[in-house]
Amino acid sequence: MTVPTIERCPAFDLSLYLVTDAALCAERGLAATIEAAIAGGVTMIQYRAKNSDFRTALAEAGMLSQLAKQAKVPLIINDRLDIALAVDAAGLHVGQSDMPPDIARQLLGRDKILGLSVSRMSEIAALDSSLVDYVGLGPVFTTATKSDAAQPLGLELFRVLRRHISVPVVAIGGIGHDRAGDVIEAGADGIAVVSAICGTADPQAAARHLKRTVLGARR
Amino acid sequence: MTVPTIERCPAFDLSLYLVTDAALCAERGLAATIEAAIAGGVTMIQYRAKNSDFRTALAEAGMLSQLAKQAKVPLIINDRLDIALAVDAAGLHVGQSDMPPDIARQLLGRDKILGLSVSRMSEIAALDSSLVDYVGLGPVFTTATKSDAAQPLGLELFRVLRRHISVPVVAIGGIGHDRAGDVIEAGADGIAVVSAICGTADPQAAARHLKRTVLGARR
């Protein structure tokens, strides 16, 4: 089986999308966690550090950008366009209350990946798919790693909402080994995980296992 | 007497530099306060909103950018390069823990004004005057509008530190009508104020009075 790479410009693969968490990654160290996850097969990395001070976030993002470039895995910065530009990240991921996608696209240019979080039908209806390269749809299940997350959609609503989205979709929120296959079968192009990799004793093995589950669930 | 405009690219005039404060400006409304201050003669405006949510800050900065362009008064954005770029502000002002000036300059280009806050000799020694267009030096006196401000310098230390800075200097921190003249005589090219304009019943009259004091104190 081959990994289907989604044809966008630049190309990216949502199959196994790791979102960093300062607390969960801190135990092993952010760099070591991400290196292990890359070795295990993560296909994208999002640096998310909502509560870090700016200089710490900038330094961590810069370090991850180097790692990610060496591994040829796109690094996406959550929320902060200034950090994304400063570290020459592969892209930016914005939420509904962050920078609007039209402004973000204008400032990023066409060569960067732009992702948007959506969690309900009204946000999907407002989505301009000419601006956004992919969507993060969720939370699918209950999550402990995002304090301001909306109510979980559940698998059935996820499946319905996904059909209304014309860009690639990564599922997010409470997804571990046991539910990764269901989410892919419900239409996700990939899964975004935090604790299922960062919160484990062996991030490389966890990533390898999740990747196999995602690829195996594809038809 | 003419207003000495500092010859930089782009040109700007630090004489009376208004820093916005959400709480103080809210009573009258941000737009009305700034319009009155412009009518009274402020020469630069800095939008500072450390605790606003992003979309509010973006909308307010966008509104001020329009106002400032009409009035041909440069609008400087505090801290957030993403907002400065998004609203096409005239410049960015960074603190010692915000984006480093070298990265900010690279992302802003040469056509934007870049300011930096300094409050001690070590920060002045580290200053690269080829990157920064002006410096905000302070707090000169005790201020109530910046919760994380350092110890006040006092006039004498301000005077000494100012001599070590080769770019234009705007004095900040607790400066009102009564002390504006002393600060200019101590070497400031202008004064940055918050409550001396925003916290008054008549911002236009307050600005006019301050401007006259600054110009009158120049030799």
Image (spheres, coloured by chain):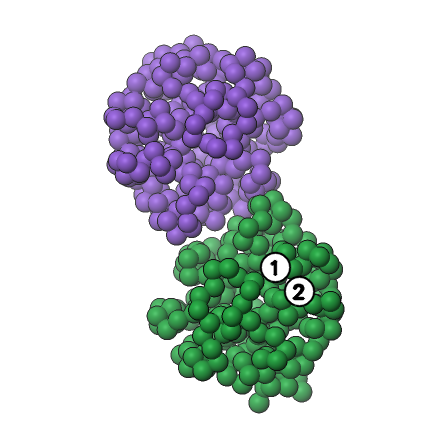
Chain colours: A purple, B green
Q: Is residue B181 visible?
A: yes
Dividing the picture into quarters, in which one does residue B214 lie? bottom right
Instruction: Please give the chain letter of the residue carrying mark 1.
Output: B
- Residue at point 64%, 70% (across, down): B196
Question: Alpha-carbon distance for marks 1 and 2?
Answer: 7 Å
Give the vertical position of B104 relative to A204 (above or below): below
Looking at the image, which residue is at 44% across and 47% down? A83
Instruction: Find numbered disc 1 in the image and state the secondary structure of the residue it sits on.
Output: loop
Tell me: residue B67, above or below residue A81.
below
Image coordinates for residue B59, horizontal then vertical, percent: 65, 48
Q: How far from the left and from the top, in percent, is residue B192?
A: 57, 70
- In the image, what residue type sits under mark 1? Asp
Which is more toward the observer, A96 or B174? B174
Which residue is denoted by mark 2 in the rendering? B198
Ranked by sequence position, the earlier of labels 1 and 2 is 1
| Quarter the N terminus of chain A occupies | top left
Q: Chain of mark 2?
A: B
Q: Is residue B185 above or below residue B149?
A: below
Q: Residue at x 69, y 78 (%)?
A: B209
Q: Residue furthest bottom?
A: B219
Residue A206's quadrant in the figure? top left
Q: Please tell me how crowded label 1 is: few (under 14), some (14-19), or many (20+) other residues with Cα within 10 Å.
A: many
Dot 2 amino acid type: Cys
User: Where residue A45 sits: x, y (%)?
Assistant: 38, 33
Is there any visible trace of residue A69 in the rendered image? no
Image quadrant where one finds the C terminus of chain A: top left
Residue B21 disc label: 1
Circle 2: element type: helix
Where residue B205 sits: x, y (%)?
A: 73, 73
Marks 2 and 1: in contact by CB < 8 Å? yes
